[in-house]
Image: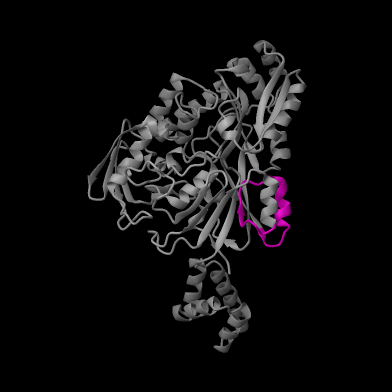
Amino acid sequence: MDDKNKSSLDHLIGADESQRLMTCMQRGATRRDILKILMAGGMQATLAGGLATTAMTAHAQTPRRGGRITVGSDTASVSDTLDPAKQSNKTDYCRGTMLYNGLTTLDASLTPQPALAESFATKDAKVWVFKLRKGVSFHDGKPLTPADVVFSILRHKDPATASKAKPLADQIESVKESGPGEVTITLTSANADLPVIVGTFHFHIVKAGTTDFNAGIGTGPYKLKEFKPGIRSVMVRNDNYWKPGKPYLDEIELVGIGDESARVNALLAGSLDLVANLNPRSIERIKGSAGYAILETQSGAYTDLILRKDVGPGANPDFVMAMKYLLDREVMKKNITLGHAVLGNDQPIDPTNRFYLAGLPQRQMDLDKAKFHLQKSGVTGRVPVVASTAAMYSVDIATVLQQSAQRIGLELELKRMPAEGYWSNHWLNSPVGFGNVNPRPSADVLLTQFFQSAAPWNESRYKSEKFDQLLTGARAEIDVGKRKQMYADMQTMIHEQAGIGIPMFLASLDGHSSKLKGLSPIPLGGMMGYSFAENVWLDA
């Protein structure tokens, strides 16, 4: 129930009468029925009308149990996994938040809140004590213990795990059970963001000793019924979930559909109830269809031009600079996203982040400078550029870039790759191509995963010992002003030296049936930061 509206009713007509109205509506009473009840009690018509509206609003926002939805995500691959350590796309993350929980969870302001840990504390930002929530059990009935937490976190440090979060876990020195229901994490150096890190998708808690993740055994709101990598997943409600009253739905089917128009058509045909990652050009069509709505989330998501610095033309810094000067950011924002974006400046931290460097001069498209650097680089001939609908807007961005390049005599050969297999076959492998980076919960997490020299996802193979030292130092810096300056220095280095072009920060646009309630923006990404599953319900 919407607390604000329910409180208004309680105050005006009393808690007992308020509850009686709610019960009537649960049995199918309409606004007219409620109006008659109130006026029969002697209430003035004007006041009764206002209260009837308030009552209906409160009832409409009351979560309802039951029902099944089908959700269309925009990524699917045979490499889809239920192992939190190896998950790497939005569909994986959605599955992960259905099946598992972390020690913490991130709210709408990306502030860490207690989850499997009911509390966390530190005196020096180096030694952290997490007290575990009592009464939590895994899907198979096993109680959550400190041993599960120790195993789940330490496995990221083992190279054999091939964890996507290993660069983040490398700062962890030890994880130990320090008492009944208590775990102590000691870092190699202070990091005030540890509660944020353990609230990210990869750090979901699994059963100690797990090596086969195909059963998806976690503590999350849903249990696994079916999992076909690259095709679909089916989850059913966990009736023993530790959050009272949640989740609301009986079953969720999650399918990956790479083609955006196919997702939109399926939504409007009633085959899907929620679809991810819409093209802005589809918004008016959806809004104009009765019974459908849009959820828009502005965040730090970006699609980036990747110029590998270890192979191909990107090994020449002048070619990299030429390509950055060819990015017509204003045109891309206006014509590609239809304004659902903010300008980027080849720095990965977006304007909503408290550590964003606003004073960095905006890089504009400059054909003269682009031509100067191209000629200085000595790169000639046709340059292949790999793009795919899998990387949001990358084909459109590449097309605009191709047109700009023609004006300085550079021939870019656009190679459109299918969405299926793009992330495993082409991303990180192509000398010139595109990536799509989902929002990250903190500046430290983003820079550690994508720009630290040894990071597996270091897209352009940017390597700088100075950068790595600044990154480590910023984590331990307690003085916010000094920390902000260190992040400013790192953004400047990426802007000037990395083989990454970031023309825009993108809004995430999801479409859904108006009957699906409970959705709200969380800037970790679309579909409530991929955590929609335990929060949504179907209106009657």
In this view, the residue in front, 255 or 57, is 255
Q: Residue at x 49, y 78 (%)?
A: 18
Q: x, y percentage for residue 173?
A: 30, 32
| 13 over 73 or under it: above or below | below
- Decide whether residue 435 is among the magenta residues: no
Residue 358 position within the rendered picture, expressed as x and y whole percent measured from the top left? 56, 33
Q: Is residue 306 above or below residue 298?
A: above
Residue 494 location (% of width, % of height): 53, 25
Check the picture and name the quadrant holding the C terminus. Answer: bottom right
Would residue 262 appear left or right of 536 to someone viewing this image? right
Inspect this view and state whether residue 478 appears: no
Q: Which residues are magenta?
A: 269-292
Number of residue marks: 0
Nearest the eye: 282 or 9: 282
Residue 273: say if magenta. Answer: yes
- In this view, the residue in front, 121 or 383, is 383
Q: Is residue 465 above or below residue 510?
A: above
50 left or right of 123?
Answer: right
The residue depicted at 71 percent of the width and 27 percent of the height is 414
> In terms of image quadrants, where is residue 244?
bottom left
Q: Colour scheme in the image?
A: one colour
Q: Is residue 247 visible?
A: yes
Asked if 51 appears above or below 127 in the picture, the reply is: below
Q: At which x and y percent is residue 270?
A: 66, 59
Left/right of residue 327 with respect to residue 66 in the rendered view: right
Can you tell which quarter of the image residue 498 is in? top right
Q: Residue at x 57, y 89 (%)?
A: 40
